[in-house]
Image (tube, rainbow, N blue to C red):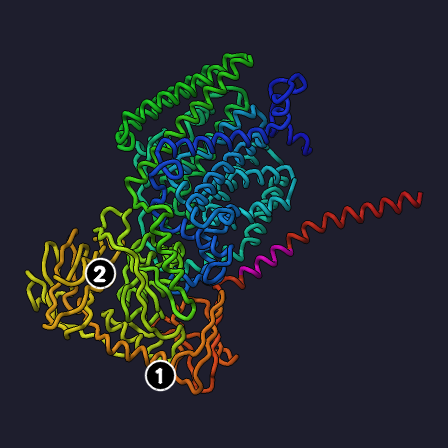
Amino acid sequence: MTRTTLTEREQGVKPAGDIKTKTGPARRLAERPRTSAALLAALLTTVAFCAADVAARSYPFGPRTRDVNDLGNQYVPFHAHLWDLLHGRADGGLLVNWQSGYGSSFLPDVGTYLSSPFALLVAVFPRDEIDLAVYTITVLKTATAGAAMAWLLLSLRRGRWWAAGLLGASYALCGWSLALASYNPMWLDGLIALPLLCLVGEWLLAGRRPLLGVVIVALAWIANFYTAYMATLGAALVLLLRLVLAELPWRRALAVLGRAAVTVGLGIGLAAPLVIVVYSGTKHAYPGREGQFTPVSTEDLLARLLPTTYSYGSPALYVGVTALVLALALPFHRGVPAKVRAGWTGLVLAAVLSLQWAPTSLAWHAFAVPNGSFYRQAFVCCALLVIAAWQALAHGTPDRRALGAAAVLLVLITAVAGHSPLVHRHPHFTWPIVALAAAGALGGLALLTFGNGRPALVGLAALLLIGAQFGEAAATSAVATHRRLNEMDDYAPWGDRQQVEADAVARADAWPRYRTEPGREQTVGNDPMVVGGQGAQYYSSLTSDVLGRTLTALGDGWTSRGRSLQSLDNPVTDALFSVGARLHNPPDPHQKWLPQDGGTSTVTRQAVPPLVTVRPAAPRTTPAAFGPSPYRNQELLLGARVYTLPRTTLSGSRPGDGARELPVDAAGTLTARCRPGSEVFLWAPHFSGTARLPGGGGRKLYRSDAENTKIATMQPLGTTGATGRVRIELRPDLPGRVPARGAVGCLDTARLRAAVRHLRATGATEVSVSDGTVHARLPAGSRGTAVVAAPRIAGWRCSADGHETPAGEFYGLIAVPLDGSATSLTCTFHPPGLRLGTAVGGASLLALLLIGAVPAVRRRTAARRGERTATAH
């Protein structure tokens, strides 16, 4: 079989009409069908996406924020940090982010959230329009996915360009995209990658563009390796089916599979410097939730095929009624070869069923249980549905028999889905949209079937189909936006509060002489990346285990099951981490559940040790072990006793019952006695509510829950009076617990100041910090252990006076032994996996260059032989 024969078979019939008879724009569109289809898909996607936000009155077209859940807490802040990095305003670089988590590895975060080429567009927006930048990137990614799918469809088989554009938009605006990826913008790179990888498969079938195929695979895995993995699996299934349908000799089929394996292997190899770093980062990350897969009911599964249904925990398979009807018509379409009908129908069914089986669900998610939705692979099923729809349309419009069967199946799906609570939530809205979309889809397809190609009827059909798709997609997106805002945590976009915080932090900042903390009353989980400073707050899927466990042992709180660490407002920990300035903010007015006090942002300062201190000796245990009390743990790191832990009594509890924690189900009082003038702190990680000293400090809010997704942070409550009596009024908003012993800590500020003076006198005399390097000058004769006030995450190496020495751990911080001779210390950070990834990437690049060079050498050699032969004759 020659390549020409294969191409004719795979591309199918010629498009209707002769382009020579067309004039003007119609002729230009017909001459460039794939370009025209891609532009139409991108236009439809953009207009429908933005129209939905106009209807939902969502940012940037209305007062409602779109920063829900991780979009506000993670993705916008990471893009803000990227903006600072690109403009030279960030503390740190690609290796270390010195603004978050007291120094976190940044390259894994880049590979997880920021490695898409689209992310670089933030640089062209003003810093205070970072939310608009992320929104624009989201729209552009979604539109690009539609354009890529439209291009792929016409590469699979020729047909009407506007129909390919319509189906391309239906893929871009699929339920997965609107319900999940629209607020997880890095996943949209997978939505783009899938049709591009399928296009690479087409090139492999035809033996074309081998180098470009490798580059596309590499870009897909660099942009977002997580969804690229799923997209690669989906593209592999499509390629296998195409090989079966092409009926190639087994040797040629094996050759295509071999080229595919080499292409994917080299592409992933080129992406290895980032992919392996991210993989290594996950090995050192704080463990997330271990979920158990539970399939959804058939009613919910079928409901998600319909417009305007929404659920975070079910597969979002909506692709539009037109695409659904065409996919349902495919098995009955006699104009499509039987093998094509059976192949694509079987692949779609197998993919959908794989969503509901635990082993295949695990395989789709790279054999790691997702920390969230179990249906992140649903976009692959959406793509297969759209491709199946194209097969039904590109082989000729389905006839009366096929359309009738599809209509019956649609009615059955709707009837079963009607029993789902996902439909019952908006019955007055869902059913009219379903009815109108079905009428537009069936009416438009009927006009195409019975119109005999008359231009007026074809144009009317196109308007009906495009209008139906536009309306139902916009409605579905608006419903998803509205439901997310009602069901998830939400955060305000950049505004006056963030600008005030940023200005205050900028005025106080003196990094690396000391750290400036953005404050305990946070706006989002990654405040330091948004408003500046160098704080403990850090929320990432790659939050390091050592950071989480260290801060938790010191009394810090967290949300998202330990991966979103908070600021710890405590003068001892401020001294430990060299926090010399701290911003105190009023509660965020956007969070209506917080008690509002109408205050303003203020900055407090205190003398703190330098970033590098010298301790007399290393801990006896390696690594050093913390105890159960956060107050004593702080003292271990400080090297001085500064707390008194009084006996406490909780009203209504029985003293001496031996319980480690006491239940708090109603308002009560916790009493203790401290030295007059002491600062009082309360540590109750599993208490939810407010605590205050009567007549003293204001109310302090604790947040905890029974599911252990969050724990409360140690809180300062005020100063004891002349009597030393402490009465803490507790007002729970959920059933909770307080420790039976050690809940209250009384800080002797005089002792703390003395300990700080000692650390300042013996610590480094000068400290400089670059991207991944800390350099310090030490006093002559320093002995014991040099401690860097940064978490000992994997990848740190140190040297004293140029002599490399192991970077040890001092209660979770970087530590280097000193023998009295060293006067300087240098610690450098190398992300785990970077060297291996660089080696794999270099080898892949070399192999790619050789693959590209060998054919060129062969052609040049053949040309020279031809010249010599011609000269000889």
Whether residue 841 appears in magenta in the rendering, the answer is: yes
Task: State whether residue 620 appears in this view.
Answer: no
Residues 220 and 26: in front is 26
Where 443 falls versus 256 (above or below)? Answer: above
Residue at the spot x=47%, y=69% of the render? 769
Residue toward you, 450 or 35: 35
Q: Mark 2 or mark 1, which is nearer the start of the sequence?
A: 1
Q: CA distance from mark 1 to mark 2?
A: 32 Å
Q: Mark 1: which secondary structure?
A: loop
Q: Amino acid at mark 2?
A: Pro
* Residue where numbered disc 1 is placed: 616
The x, y position of residue 279, in whole percent, is 46, 57
Residue 685, label in figure: 2
Where the N terminus falls, by quadrant?
Answer: top right
Viewport quadrant of the C terminus: top right
What type of secondary structure mainly makes up the magenta span? helix
Image location (x, y in percent) of residue 731: 13, 55
